[in-house]
Image: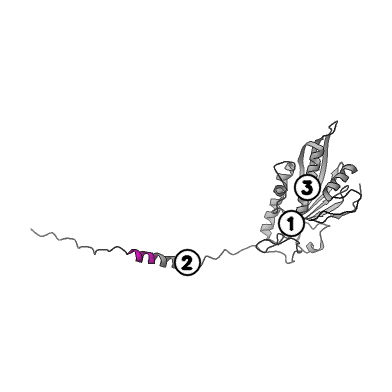
C-alpha cells in the first residue's frame, strides 16, 4: 500500500515574552502620541465691522476676554434671539418667589454695563448689572409689602426692524444697521392692596430693550412710561429704599454702584 504522506508541520510559534509585549505597547503609544492633532475646521464667520468697543469698567473673564467683546454675526444673532426668548419666558414670572435676580437677569443675556432708565416720578439712571438686580429686588419687595397676589402679564412684544436709533451713542454710529436691534415690551402689573378696602391695583408699563451692537447682550432697559403714575408718597418711599436718600434730598448712591439723576418732565 502506498504510504499516506503526512502534512508538513507548521513551525512552532513561541509566545511573546511579557517584556517584549510591554515594549511594543510603549512603542505604539509613543507612535500615537507623536501624531499631531487634527486641525480645526476653517471658520467662515467674520466680523463686519472694525471699531473697537468702549472699554468696560468690569474685570475681564478668566480667559482675558471682556464680556462685551465683539462676536461674529452668527453668534450675535444667536444672542439676540436668546435675549428675546428669555424676556418672553421670564417677564411673566417677575414675582415668582423661586426666581432671583441671577435667574431673571443672567450675564448670558444682560450686559455687565446694562443701564436702567426710569421715568418720572423716578427720574433716575442706574448703570451696572449689580445695581440693576438690586433695583429690581427693592422694587419687588416694596410692591410685595403693599400688595398681595402680585403678578405680571406680557401684553405685547415688538421686535424692531434693523435701524439706527436716534438716541444711539457716538461710538455705535459707525456700526452696520443690521447690528442695531430693539425690543419694546408692554407689561402689566397687578395685585390687591393690603390696606382696606383692598382695591385691585394695576399698572401698565412700556419698556424698551436695546441690544449691544458688539456683543448682542441687552445694554439698555428704558422704562418709557408707567400708567397710572404712582403717587409721590410711593415714589418717595421707593427712592428712599433704593438709594438711601429721601425724595427731595441730594442724591447719595450706596457704596458699590453709582446713581445719576435726570430731570424728566412730568406728563
Res 33 label: 2
Toward the viewer: 35 or 106?
106
Give the total of numbered labels: 3
The residue that label 3 is drawn on is 136
Quarter of the picture holding the N terminus: bottom left
How far across and down, in percent of the image, does residue 146 sit? Answer: 82, 38
Horizontally, residue 27 falls left or right of residue 201, namely: left
Q: Secondary structure at mark 2?
A: helix
Crowd rating for badge 2 (residues with CA inside 10 Å; few <14, some 14–19, many 20+): few
Residue 108 within the magenta-colored segment of the rendering: no
The residue that label 1 is drawn on is 112
Crowd rating for badge 1 (residues with CA inside 10 Å; few <14, some 14–19, many 20+): many
Res 128 label: none
Crowd rating for badge 3 (residues with CA inside 10 Å; few <14, some 14–19, many 20+): some
| Residue at the (80%, 39%) spot, across then down | 145
The disc, 3 or 2, on the residue closer to the chain's N-terminal end is 2
The disc, 3 or 1, on the residue closer to the chain's N-terminal end is 1
Give the magenta part as a residue range: 15-24
The disc, 2 or 1, on the residue closer to the chain's N-terminal end is 2
For residue 49, which quarter of the picture? Answer: bottom right
How far across and down, in percent of the image, does residue 175 sit? Answer: 76, 62
Going by the picture, which residue comes out furthest to the left?
Answer: 1
How far across and down, in percent of the image, does residue 13 sit? Answer: 27, 63
Amino acid at each position: 500500500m502506498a504510504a499516506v504522506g503526512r502534512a508538513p508541520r507548521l513551525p512552532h510559534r513561541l509566545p511573546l515574552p511579557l517584556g517584549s509585549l510591554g515594549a511594543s505597547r510603549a512603542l505604539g503609544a509613543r507612535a500615537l502620541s507623536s501624531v499631531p492633532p487634527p486641525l480645526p475646521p476653517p471658520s467662515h464667520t467674520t466680523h463686519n465691522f472694525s471699531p473697537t468697543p468702549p472699554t468696560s469698567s468690569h474685570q475681564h473673564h478668566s480667559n482675558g476676554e471682556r464680556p462685551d467683546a465683539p462676536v461674529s454675526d452668527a453668534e450675535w444673532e444667536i444672542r439676540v434671539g436668546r435675549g428675546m426668548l428669555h424676556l418672553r419666558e421670564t417677564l411673566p414670572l417677575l414675582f415668582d418667589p423661586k426666581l432671583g435676580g441671577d435667574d431673571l437677569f443672567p450675564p448670558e443675556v444682560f450686559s455687565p454695563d446694562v443701564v436702567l432708565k426710569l421715568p418720572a416720578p423716578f427720574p433716575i439712571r442706574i448703570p451696572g448689572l449689580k445695581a440693576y438686580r438690586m433695583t429690581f429686588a427693592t422694587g419687588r419687595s416694596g410692591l410685595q409689602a403693599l400688595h398681595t397676589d402680585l403678578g405680571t402679564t406680557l401684553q405685547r412684544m415688538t421686535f424692531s426692524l434693523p435701524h439706527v436709533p436716534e438716541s444711539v451713542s457716538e461710538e455705535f454710529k459707525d456700526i452696520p444697521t443690521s447690528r442695531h436691534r430693539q425690543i419694546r415690551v408692554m407689561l402689566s402689573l397687578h395685585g390687591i392692596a393690603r390696606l382696606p378696602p383692598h382695591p385691585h391695583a394695576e399698572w401698565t408699563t412700556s419698556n424698551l430693550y436695546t441690544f449691544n451692537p458688539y456683543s448682542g447682550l441687552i445694554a439698555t432697559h428704558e422704562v418709557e412710561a408707567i400708567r397710572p403714575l404712582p403717587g409721590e408718597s410711593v415714589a418717595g418711599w421707593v427712592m428712599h429704599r433704593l438709594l438711601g436718600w429721601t425724595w427731595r434730598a441730594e442724591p447719595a448712591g450706596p457704596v458699590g454702584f453709582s446713581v445719576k439723576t435726570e430731570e424728566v418732565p412730568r406728563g
